[in-house]
Amino acid sequence: MSAFVDETRFEVRSGDGGAGSSSFRREKYVPRGGPDGGDGGKGGDVIFITRRNLATLSHTRGKVIYKAKHGDPGRGRKRHGKNGEDIIIPVPPGTIITDTETGEVLHDFPTNVEGEEWACLTGGKGGLGNWHFRTSRNQSPTYFQDGKPGMNRNVSLELALIADIGLVGMPSAGKSSLINALTAANSKVGAYPFTTKIPSLGVLRRGETEVVLADIPGLIEGASNGAGLGHKFLRHIGRSGSLAYLTDLGEEDPVHAVMLLEEELRKYNSQLSDKNRIIIGSKTDLDETGEKLSALISSFPEDKVLGVSVYTRNGLNELTDAFIEWGSAVK
């Protein structure tokens, strides 16, 4: 299985145009024929295209440069040089391409389109052959044009996962266990922080309705400033249609954990606070969690707050109903 790669960078180069030809018509009975040098071929383009069968950028990892082919030079008898072959770089939908040097976002591929093409660089134009430069005063020009050089650019690619609902929470809040209970995601589960090192997707199905859930690695205080593992994956949250805040009722203060999540997401992107959300108190099977769930409900009166237990499956049906409803609404 390929490693999950959601960031990569490399150089791209379009092809040089081929040079025109300086040639003269020479046949048995035409010893002094006119110029007939053909034009050079155009250099190849650098083209990105989306492919739904790609889930990560792992196929570009370790690649230093992508180069399109150069155009061939022109030839006699006004024969045009062959155009250089384009370089096609497939990427998953949702890929953002940025100029590494300027930080400018060059292209943002939509998350739901297969086969969208974007020409990052255009190949150099082929040079003109000498037959273009004949005049009444100069019937035998030897001048021809060199092809135009191609272009180069350093780019960085970032992939933001496509999900209807993103699960966010502190480390060990139970996100992986919950997404495994609701879907077939098979996220790694463990009783220690940062079990989830990479985001994973699961599909919740009911009848013909499918809702994609994303298990985002645990956030910690300071994640918006790069602390822990959270900063690396915050962009995945931004492309989720709705958010589910998961807080561990077995912890001392689950209300504070939700407030901390709110603050970190707000610092990263204030628009995240506008997303539809649900608050989930996990591990209701533990002792003395009833009062903490009540405190959670009273602390966030404008939100839907549910208590669940993966162990006893308490509350999972109600949570599934909410996910199906919200996930369907954003499609």
Image: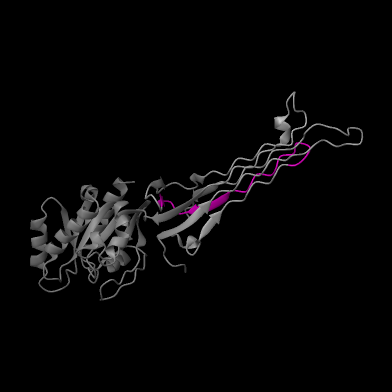
Is residue 318 visible from the viewing direction of this image?
A: no
Residue closest to the far bottom: 191
**Direction right: furthest residue:** 29
Magenta stretch contains residue 13? no
Q: Is residue 302 visible?
A: yes
**Residue segment shown in magenta:** 75-99
Q: Position of residue 171 (x, y in %)?
A: 24, 69
Give the percent coordinates (x, y) of residue 131: 73, 32
Q: Main secondary structure of the magenta part?
A: loop
Instruction: Between residue 153 and residue 302, name the one nearer to us.
Output: 153
Give the x, y percent position of residue 314: 21, 66
Q: Is 309 drawn above or below residue 321 in the view shown?
A: below
Q: Is residue 225 left or right of residue 27?
A: left
Which residue is more in the foreground, 198 or 86?
Answer: 86
Vertical placement of residue 177 versus 160, above or below: below
**Colour setting:** one colour
State which quadrant residue 193 falls in: bottom left
Compared with 65, 109 (above or below) is: above
Asked if residue 191 is positioned above or below residue 43 in the image, the reply reads: below
Image quadrant in which you'd find residue 234: bottom left
Q: How many marks?
A: 0
**At x 24% / y 70%, what residue is drawn?**
172
